[in-house]
Image: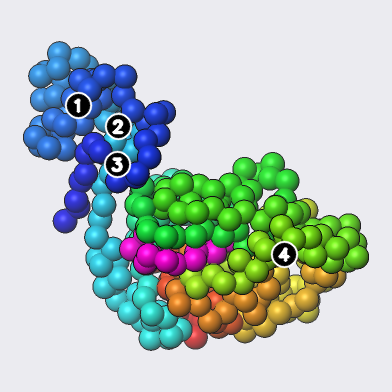
Amino acid sequence: MPNTRLGKSRTTSVDATRLPARADAPSIEAAWLYYHDGLNQNDIAERMQISRASVVNYLNEARNLGWVRIHLDSDVFKGHRLAEELCAAYGLTEAMVVPDDPMNADGAAASVARVTRAAADWLPRLLEPGDRLGVSWGSTIWQMAQQVPSTPVKDLSVIQLLGSRPAALGFAAEACTATLAQRLGGECINLHAPLVLSNKALRDALCDEPVVRDQLNALATCNKTVLASGTCNAGGAHIVRSRIISENELSEYREKGAVGVICGRLIDRHGNPVVSAVEERMIGVSLDQMRGKDMALLVAAGPGRALPAFAAMKGGFATHLVTSTRVAEELLEMI
């Protein structure tokens, strides 16, 4: 049964941009009548003497500003038959399978939106006081981070796992980390260094700088992670769009077996490294450091994500999985 919360945030600090100008703002009144009093939109329009379209706009405003949060118990999705089969097949601790939306014309985008929302709701409940959460990057992680409810976790550290990269695509690693830290009330530890340097000597020298060395030491202590496994598909791979490697280089690595990307590093279908020439110039978490975590939440959504997710799970990079029905079925066919 959905549990709807209206009003006061659980954060210890107040974001003034989310507060209404007045306590009797019409968006709050409409939300109260709809979610607490159970009136339908026509009844609210008549009660408030406004149009039904205005009611819809007020309800959307209340949701967008975080005054209303609708939480569907994740146990509903964890009990899905496909979730149980995925846990058995891949040795996962838990899995969550969200249904695809067959009626949506933009099925891929709708599926990603559903999966990232489910992951956002689940993540805070996978954390405990004192945890050190390592954060990957990419559009999937960014979408998830923006939807995480304000849920402070005591003594939490949120740590950027790889260096920064110019993010014309809108999901820089530091933004993913900072957003999650804000939503979870944790200490934000960004990695103040570029992801890729022009040569290895410069990379090594920068890693020896005390501030960068301390941040690299911090990311090595993460006991939990949240990540996505990127694709190696031609014409759209994130690792190419962010200009870490070229399309021609990626084609060569695909021939060597690369099927997925974990924090900028290529892996084959068994989760083993496919070492690229750029890696000696990269600053960030290693593949070995990404394995063996107490909890590693893999978010897999959208076309072409089944094979990278398969590789990530086979490589020991995930203990928990959030995905869609379609991807779950593809994953089970790969066993």
- Is 100 situated above or below 168? below
Q: Residue at x 42, y 81 (%)?
A: 92
Residue extent of the magenta highlight: 124-137
Query: Mark 3 or mark 1: which is in front?
Result: 3
Disc 1 crowd rating (10 Å Cα; few below 14, some 14-19, many 20+) is: many
Marks 3 and 1 sit apart, C-alpha to C-alpha, by: 19 Å
- Is 113 situated above or below 305? above
Q: Which mark is residue 30?
A: 1
Identify which amino acid the numbered label 4 is placed on: Arg
Marks 4 and 2 sit apart, C-alpha to C-alpha, by: 44 Å
Q: Give the residue at mark 3.
A: 9
Query: Mark 3 or mark 4: which is in front?
Result: 4
Q: Residue 280 falls in which quadrant of the image?
A: bottom right
Q: Which mark is residue 62?
A: 2
x, y percentage for residue 151?
34, 52
Identify which amino acid the numbered label 3 is placed on: Ser
Q: Give the residue at mark 4.
A: 213
The answer to whether mark 2 and mark 3 are in CB contact below 8 A is no
The answer to whether mark 2 and mark 1 are in CB contact below 8 A is yes
Residue 114 seen in the current view:
no
